[in-house]
Every structure is written in C-alpha cells, then in structure tokens.
Image (spheres, rainbow, N blue to C red):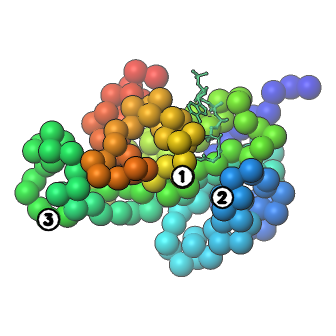
Amino acid sequence: MPAPEWSIEALSCPHHNRKGFTCTAKPLEVYLRCQARQDVEKRIAAVFVLTPDGHTIAGYYTLSQFSVRLADIPPETARKLAKYPDVPATLLGRLAVGDPYRGQKLGEKLLLDALARSLEHSKGVASFAVIVDAKDESALGFYRKYGFLAFPGTNNRLFLPMGTIEQLLTELK
Ligand SMILES: CC(C)(COP(=O)(O)OP(=O)(O)OC[C@H]1O[C@@H](n2cnc3c(N)ncnc32)[C@H](O)[C@@H]1OP(=O)(O)O)[C@@H](O)C(=O)NCCC(=O)NCCS
C-alpha cells in the first residue's frame, strides 16, 4: 500500500471525522470530539488536524494568543525583552496523536507545523515564544527533546523563544 499523503488542515466540520479519533490521553480525545468545534466558532482556539485522506484525523493541535507576566519568565530571557509587565506569546494548548498512529514521527510533524505556523503568525501579530503546558512527565520529555525550556516555579509550563524556533526550522530545511 502506498504511504499516505499527510496534510495538516484547519478543522472543518463535518468533513473531518472527530468521533473517530481515539487517544489514551482521554481529555485530549474528548476535547477534539466535544469541544474543539465550539472553540473554533468562538475564536478561542484555532484547531489543526493531521489527516491522510481529508476525513480521518490522525492527530491535532490547537493554537491561541496568550500573554505571560514578564516576572514569570526566566531572568536570562526576560532581560532581553522590553520592560512591559506582560509580553505576548502563542499558546500551543493541545497536541495529540491518535493511538493507532503513534511512533511514526507524526507528533514531530504536528509540533514542527505548529512552530512554523506560530513563527509566521508572529510576523504579523508579535509573540516572543510558544508556550506549552505539558500534561505529564511523558509530554515534558517530548517537548524537551525539541528544546523547550522550563518556566521557573512551574512543574509543567515550558516555552520556546521565536528566535530559537526560527533557527530550528532553518536547520531542518
Ligand atoms: C507525545 C506524542 C504527541 C508523541 O507523538 P508520536 O507521534 O508518538 O511521536 P513521534 O513519533 O513524532 O516522536 C518523535 C520523537 O520524539 C520522541 N518522543 C516521543 N514521545 C516522547 C516522550 N513522551 N518523551 C520523550 N521523547 C518522546 C520519539 O522517540 C522520537 O524521537 P527520535 O526522533 O529520536 O526517534 C504522543 O505520544 C501523544 O499524543 N501523547 C498523548 C498526548 C500528549 O502527551 N500530548 C502532549 C501535549 S500535553
């Protein structure tokens, strides 16, 4: 069988089969099935799905605008930013690969697409970094592999500066 031609598309209902998405991380499964469509309609989150055929959903991620208190950012990064109380950022709120599709570099494909999209968007609406809240130790391991850095004083919040994202994507070209 030929390898699928993966594409990453904005969630569109009813074209994409949200009910067919299964993920052992149940909150991430339930979110796509029950909440994602409303979040898109209410402009709370942009949802992008990875599909082999325009219908099946193999994975997804969400992006939203976000802001971070300068005081919460590690001093070595904060020092380089303007002295505003809050700085603009991009929230990668959720990212998941469906159970049947794990271990095929699709998580990486989704993450790199989310980073590239965030970087491109930041040229029009500024953002200093992509922020993630990793749901557990395993997710922390996944994001750290791509260079995400910890926020001091939090167990699960990580960030990747836009400058680092630009470098990473240039290296991968
Ligand atoms: C984490 C997740 C997205 C990884 O997706 P995946 O498609 O199975 O992973 P990939 O095949 O793309 O892995 C890419 C690389 O990351 C590594 N990796 C994958 N999961 C990892 C983990 N939990 N910790 C450390 N490294 C991990 C892989 O070994 C691979 O490394 P390699 O290039 O050196 O071989 C997926 O397991 C998932 O959806 N988990 C449940 C939801 C979740 O935890 N989401 C994170 C956001 S809260």
Q: In which quarter of the image is residue 5?
A: top right
Name which residue lies at 53% across and 42% down. Answer: 137
Between disc 1 and disc 3, the foreground one is 1
- Image marks 2 and 1: residues in contact by CB distance under 8 Å: yes
Q: What is the C-alpha distance between the residues marked 3 and 2?
A: 32 Å
Name which residue lies at 40% across and 50% down. Answer: 155
Q: Mark 3 points at which residue?
A: 85
Is ligand 1 within 8 Å of the beta carbon of the residue shown at mark 1? yes
Residue 52, horizontal then vertical, whole percent: 77, 41
**What amino acid does circle 3 point to?**
Pro
Q: What is the C-alpha distance between the residues marked 1 and 3?
A: 27 Å
Quadrant holding the N terminus: top right
Residue 142, horizontal then vertical, whole percent: 53, 35
Is ligand 1 within 8 Å of the beta carbon of the residue shown at mark 2? yes
Q: In which quarter of the image is residue 29?
A: bottom right
Between disc 2 and disc 1, the foreground one is 1
Q: Name the residue under label 1.
A: 135
Judged left or right of residue 152, residue 40 is right
- For numbered disc 3, what is the local secondary structure? loop
- For numbered disc 2, what is the local secondary structure? helix
Judged left or right of residue 127, residue 8 is right
Name which residue lies at 69% across and 53% down. Answer: 25
**What amino acid does circle 1 point to?**
Lys
Q: Name the residue under label 2.
A: 28
Point out the residue furthest to the right here.
1
